[in-house]
Image (cartoon, rainbow, N blue to C red):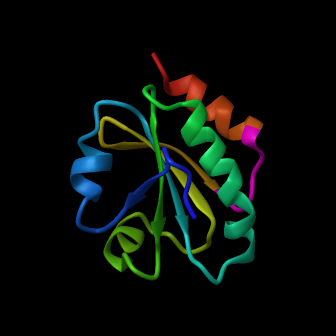
């Protein structure tokens, strides 16, 4: 399902793996029933591969992790949020291109 570098975020590991991460973290808020989310999946996996060692990239299933989705006001999916040092830096709602996500990532990599 997910690529080898694509992480799975949950309510249980969100604090540690996302908010306390030393690297920027791109989180794909998604659900299995969401068609556009499934279309974004290969893009997210490709970015995780490409940015391995420089940024963390992963997915959070909003149906299974209601607390994290609610905490960041996720109303519409897919939503991509880039976190850096525990802060929301960028947010994209809806399907987007790999290029636009790369621009966001590159902007926040030192």
| Looking at the image, residue 68 lies above or below residue 41 | below
Residue lying at 59% horizontally and 24% vertically, measured from the top left: 106
Image coords of residue 46 (percent x, y): 65, 42
Q: Is residue 90 above or below residue 9?
A: above
Q: Main secondary structure of the magenta part?
A: loop
User: Residue 105, how many percent across, how many down?
Assistant: 57, 32
Q: Nearer the viewer, residue 71 or 27?
A: 27
Query: Residue placed farthest to the top in the image?
Result: 110
Horizontal relation, residue 105 to residue 96: left or right: left
Residue 37 lies in quadrant: bottom right
Horizontal side of residue 29 vs 11, given as left or right: right
What span is colored magenta in the figure? 93-98
Q: Quadrant of residue 84?
A: top left
Q: Is residue 34 shown above or below 24?
A: below
- The residue lying at 28 percent from left, 38 percent from top is 21
In the rendered view, does 79 fall on the left or right side of 85?
right
Residue situated in front as seen by the camera: 13 or 72: 13
Q: Residue at x 36, y 31 (%)?
A: 23
Task: Look at the image and tell me in which quarter the C terminus lies.
Answer: top left
Residue 45 percent coordinates (x, y): 61, 49
Residue 32 highlighted magenta (yes or no)? no
Q: For the N terminus, which image quadrant?
A: bottom right
> Residue 49 versus residue 63: which sits nearer the camera?
49
């Amino acid at each position: 399902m997910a690529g080898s570098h694509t992480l799975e975020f949950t309510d249980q590991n969100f604090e540690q793996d996302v908010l306390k991460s030393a690297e920027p973290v791109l989180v794909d808020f998604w659900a299995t029933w969401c068609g556009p989310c499934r279309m974004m999946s290969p893009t997210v996996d490709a970015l995780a591969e490409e940015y391995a060692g420089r940024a963390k990239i992963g997915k959070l299933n909003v149906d299974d992790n209601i607390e994290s989705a609610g905490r960041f006001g996720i109303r519409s999916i897919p939503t991509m949020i880039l976190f850096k040092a525990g802060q929301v830096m960028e947010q994209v709602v809806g399907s987007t291109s790999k290029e636009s996500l790369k621009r966001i990532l590159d902007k926040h990599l030192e």
